[in-house]
Amino acid sequence: MDALFHASPFTGYVYPNETIIPWTVLIVVYPYLTGLVAGAFTISSLYQVFGFARLRPVAHFALLVSLCSMLVVPLPLLLHLGHPERAFNAMITPHTTSAFAIFGYAAAFYVILLMLETWFVFRPYIVHQAQKRTGLLGWYYRILSLGSYDLSEKAMRYDRKWIFALAIIGIPGAHGLHGYVGFVFGSLKSREWWSSDLMPAIFLFSAIISGTALLIVLYVVSCKLRRVPVDLPCLKGMAYTLWGFMMFTLLLEGVEFASLVYRGREGIDVIMEFVKGPLIVPFFIMQFGVGSVLPLLVLTFLIWRGTTGPALVWGIVGSAILVLLAVLMMRWNVVIGGQEISKTGKGLVSYQPGILGREGLLAAALVLTIPMALLAVVVRLFPPWEEAETSTPSPVIL
Amino acid sequence: MDDKEKLGKHEKERRDFLARVGGALACGAAALAAGAAASRATAATGDAAATSEPPAIPDHDWTKHRWAFGVDATKCIGCLRCVEACKRENDVVLDPHHFRTWVERYVYLEGDDDARVDSQSDPVNIEASGSKGEYRFANRYQDAKVDKAFFVPKLCNQCTHPACVQVCPTGATYKTEDGVVLIDHAYCIGCQYCVQACPYGARYFDEGKGVTDKCTWCYHRITKGLQPACVEVCPVGARIFGDRNDNDSPISQFIKNNRVHVLKPETGNAPNVFYVGTDKDVN
């Protein structure tokens, strides 16, 4: 039987009700997932909207990564709720003053947008399969084709317009959804660690780097699985994107932290105690050192030396894995860190996650693997690769 | 207002991990398919707006009262009867992690600039009481040289601009016309955003019921003309309660005759618990 709650040890003085951390590791996973969604969508949009041709090999794959991650986003929230069966209350009677009331609508809107864009992008493939295949899969593609087998130039032009429009709407959609997750934390005045105007921007930039890093890893893994050579210009394009946005992310995080310390409002003593103690390993070593500075140096070195071949591939993949770790730690340090600093300003709580149980580490890990499992199925139904029979519409170049 | 009957005992409500995952997956699938879910006007709008439908309480007109609470910290002796009475009156989980009200002890030792603070839920005090449901302050400073010491009772401030009501995504928590912030336990989804938003640590999550809970100033009692349980049992009159619409009520007199202050006024929440006799370290 799962324990009803885990009380946390504390030092100094904390309010009696604070000894149970309200938002657990599942709420760490939630913004991590929405970040991957926004980041992967950014790569897709760089090709579809801004015409970054070198990202073409991953553009459609990015869309599928975004969709598969987005489908799982509600899961950590539902697992966390005391009454998941009442989750619809927030949609039936959304309380308009709540930063969270809009989530159901925003998420539903974005899922529909992603599904629509995916449908338009893969329509030629769906039509070909519907005409070619028999049996259950044949039926599947025939239903998905919605009865239209028209692949004429006129129809494709129409499709391209839709893809372009959806990709444009998706940019504020994806980034709005994630920026607003930052607002959920940043708007709370009860916690000094969260209460920052920069929080939505920090969430956004870290989202872009996490999505890009995930795409780098998945793309190279998929190339190895398919036994095809890695498209180096495409990989380098993603590495440049990663490098550029990492600079912004680090800068914003630095400015935010400096402001917090410089303002030095009530409770800063206990915050500094937190920074110099429990935060050393998860923040300074894992998030900042190993997860940010090291990959940034490696990427800089690779770009500067003009490295190519396998060294370039594995250097970029290694950096991307470290960035994925850094962003996960960033979510952890924000979500858990904020709750470890007591509202009394006089004490620190120490969150100790359980392994098993509804809100344990295992459940969180499971939630993070579901998008990958989904993706493994979806790429077989809708192959996003160049060599597949997709005859995908090329982007509208402005 | 009370939904205790519906909720039953904690133990009965425990669900195992797989059942949760199954239920959550089903809800997740349903949530994704519901882009066009019907919406209707929210029951409670505005950060401090009252719900438009008053509860059906016989002989209680909530437009005619403006409840407020006073704490005279100079009188509190730290006996903790209030905490125990509250737990029993309101079916609060009997452990040291869930409280609708609590008492803090501030001790300035000779030479110290800052107070040493603890509450009845401190492990040392729990060990001294020998019980997780009955509370005592351990005599931990008996050999120290104490410059100054006092107790401060804490409870929900029933703020005029409650941050908890502002952030509730469903409107399950709302402010009544007579000034109390309540939670509809039959509607709360248990997201705990309100627990995060309260600057005073007044809210907790009841894991057994799957909903958040907090002090209601014993709304079920005050609407029948009774005092909140903690006020009723306080042997020294450190807790004062009444109707600010009545000039002669104990609370109106307390506010008039003392220089009162509220906790954390900088949050803009405008609390309605008025304090006398606290000190620089109390927040």
Image (cartoon, coloured by chain):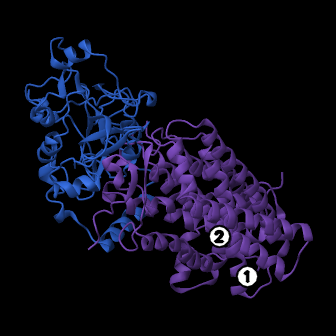
In the rendered image, which quarter is residue A36 located in?
A: bottom right
Report the amino acid beneath label 2.
Tyr
Q: In this view, does B169 lie to the left or right of A394?
A: left
Q: Closer to the observer: label 1 or label 2?
A: 1
Q: Position of residue A303 (x, y in %)?
A: 87, 67
Identify the chain of the residue marked 2, using the numbered disc in the image. A
At label 2, counting other C-alpha atoms closer than 10 Å, the crowd grade (few under 14, some 14-19, many 20 or more) is some
Measured Cα–Cα span from mark 1 to mark 2: 31 Å
In the rendered image, which quarter is residue A349 located in?
A: bottom left
**Residue at figure coordinates x 34%, y 43% from the top left:** B117
Colour in which chain A is drawn: purple
Q: Where is residue B248 in the image (x, y as percent from the top left)?
A: 15, 12
Chain whose colour in the figure is blue: B
Q: Considering only vertical position in the picture, is A219 above or below B68? A: below
In this view, the residue in front, A144 or A193, is: A193
Q: In this view, does B70 lie to the left or right of B163?
A: left
Quickly name the residue at label 2.
Answer: A149
Q: In this view, does A95 lie to the left or right of B241?
A: right
In the rendered image, which quarter is residue B72 located in?
A: top left
Report the amino acid beneath label 1.
Cys
Q: Are marks 1 and 2 in contact (CB under 8 Å)?
A: no
Q: Position of residue A118 (x, y in %)?
A: 63, 64
Quickly name the residue at label 1.
Answer: A223
